[in-house]
Amino acid sequence: MADIIKSHKQNKLSISIRQRMDKAPLWLELTTILTILMILLTAALTTATYRRNRQVTLSSETETSRQMLQLKTMNLERYIDELAAFSIQSVYDNSLYASMQSRTPLSDTERSSISSYIRGFYYSRSDLNSFMMYLINQGLDVGYSSGSTVGYERVRFKAVDSADYTSIIESCNESPNNCSILPASSSNSLFHFDHTIVRVRDNSPIALISFDVDLTELEGLTQNSTGLDRFIVLLNSEGDLLYSDLDYITDNYGPDSERVVLFPESGSSDTITLNGVKYLSVSEADSKYGLKLVSLVPVGQLTQKVRSASFDAVLEQIMFFALAIVLIFLLVRWLTQPLSVLSSKQEKAGTGDFSSIDIGRSREIKALSNSFNEMTTHIGSLIDQNYASELNEKTAQLAALEAQMNPHFLYNTLQAIGSEALMHDEMDVYTMLTSLAGNLRYSIKAAAEVPLQDEMKYVDNYIRLQKVRMGDRLTVSQKIDPATLVALIPKISIQPLVENSIQHGIQGDRTSVKILIEAFYKGDYLVIRVTDDGIGISPEDIGNLNNSFTRQTLADNGASIGLTNLYHRIRLMYENDAALQIKSETGESSYTSVTMILSVNSSRITEVTKKQTSDTETEQTKQNV
């Protein structure tokens, strides 16, 4: 039911749109269609061009970032080489190298000498924040920091547990360069550098040189000449964060199990999202120390450049589009002008002006004008044929009246027999004859549609005839909405449903049947339902019935020809805005329900109401006379 109502609303909308289109001139429709096509084409081209330019911009920026990172990686590798060379300078001092290998406690002279060496190492470079030498055989940590103001107090000797440096020494030994680069412990340092000093004889580590490198090297890493907000990320070979000028990465890039940022592999690029912002990420790594440099450029800035570059092109497309619309309008008006002339001539033909026309401009238009001239030539003969058809129609009506004489004679005869039966006190015979006569008179009415109340009288007569035959085995109840009694429905449309329930409800061991007849409004539809508690219909038989409906032909099976005939009648009378639905169950709770759904036409109800009012006034007039 809901599907029918939805389909009905869609049909109304479709009809409304079609009616509006029918009122629009052809030139306006063509201009509108071509304009829409131009808009769609222009939008498609603009979108495709924007996407292509965006991709080209991203590819170009990726290549630029890769070249920049390669250069910065080379500079960074050269810088680490310098730090590594600086770390092993202590080997070239024999006394210091001997102190590193000694296992006996250091004398005061050796301590003073080591302090002088360390201060000299520290001041020999301007990019160190601290310098530390761990003597493995002595278990001493000799450190020098720029935090104190008195030079000699800056050098400190501290006994430490060798286990504190085991992991660092192992990391340096595993490296082919005997060094490791780790995150700095302070915010004013770029990274922490460690390098082991080994004994030449057995290549065993005897000392560890460590120092913090300040942020001087950042000038080379963060230098940017592209005009974009480019962020740099520096990672060591283990993936630890050494430096980032993007706060979100600095705050969220933790140990391996907690990292929230995944950067692409070296030599590749990808688009990542950080804190809701998309970035073009390009990475490069040096092959010697495993340091990875990552460049992050906001994608929004790249697309903004594409939009700015595309603005002039869009303006040119708009100007071209406006000019094209004007040309399309003029061309369509020129092409459709002959059709306007032909339409005007057709309106004059409706008033009786059947003169011929001569329009051309194209082969199709010429053929159309010739067809119009041929049509007007035959109009006179068609008018004569129309007069002849009217005469034939009158003759057919007379023949129909003659054909009705025999049914009227049969009706009068049944009434006379019924009177005789009443006089002899044969009430059952009288009931059957009067009911049969009433139905016979109802069936020969000319009207194809009747009020529901008249159809129910016809059904009541039919039920009385069946009650005489079946007695208490037949029980019929009605649930009719009084508002539906004035609605027009197809003549003899409910009786076939009742007859179907009686004939097919009592079969096998079923000896009686109860029937319920309902009628009510649902939205814009009148619903009439006949339900019985008979043996029911199998799903296969229901499928055959539905197939007979869709074949648009009467079924071969005589058991279902009444329903099939009724289905096609209501579909034709209501222009497919009607339905016949069948539901049934077999078994202990068997039933069959046949529902007829008809669209409601207010004019039909109005006509019936007017007719009832007129009949009432006529009857009152007769009584007064």
Image (cartoon, helix red, strand yellow):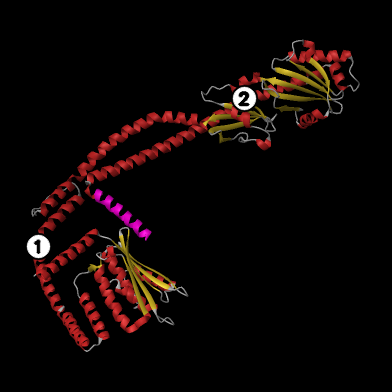
- Residue 196, position as x, y percentages in the image: 79, 25
Q: Residue at the far top: name it.
A: 150
Q: In which quadrant is the N terminus drawn?
A: bottom left
Q: Is residue 4 magenta?
A: yes
Task: Judge by depth and name the residue closer to the eye, 608 or 427.
Answer: 427
The correct choice, above or below, for 55 with respect to 354 in the image is above
What residue sits right under mark 1 in the picture?
383
Mark 2: secondary structure: helix
Please, what is the three-letter code of the amino acid marked with disc 2? Lys
Q: Which mark is residue 185?
A: none
Report the side of 139 relative to 290 (left or right): right
Is residue 490 among what the camera can see? no
Task: Judge by depth and name the residue closer to the eye, 170 or 472.
Answer: 472
Q: Which residues lie in the magenta part? A: 1-21
The correct choice, above or below, for 338 with respect to 225 in the image is below
Which numbered mark, 1 or 2, is in the foreground of this view? Answer: 1
Q: Mark 2: few, some, or many residues within 10 Å (few <14, many ≥20)?
A: some
Q: Is residue 509 magenta?
A: no
The correct choice, above or below, for 551 with respect to 3 in the image is below
- Residue 344, position as x, y percentages in the image: 14, 48
Task: Judge by depth and name the residue closer to the eye, 428 or 438.
Answer: 428
| Residue 538 placement: quadrant | bottom left
Is residue 529 among what the camera can see? yes
Please, what is the three-letter code of the amino acid marked with disc 1? Ile
Q: CA distance from mark 1 to mark 2?
A: 98 Å
| Residue 153 placement: quadrant | top right
What residue sits right under mark 2 in the picture?
72
Q: Mark 1: few, some, or many residues within 10 Å (few <14, many ≥20)?
A: few
Q: Residue at the far bottom: name it.
A: 424
Q: In which quadrant is the C terminus drawn?
A: bottom left
* Residue plotted at (10% across, 69% down): 624
- Residue 304, position as x, y percentages in the image: 46, 29
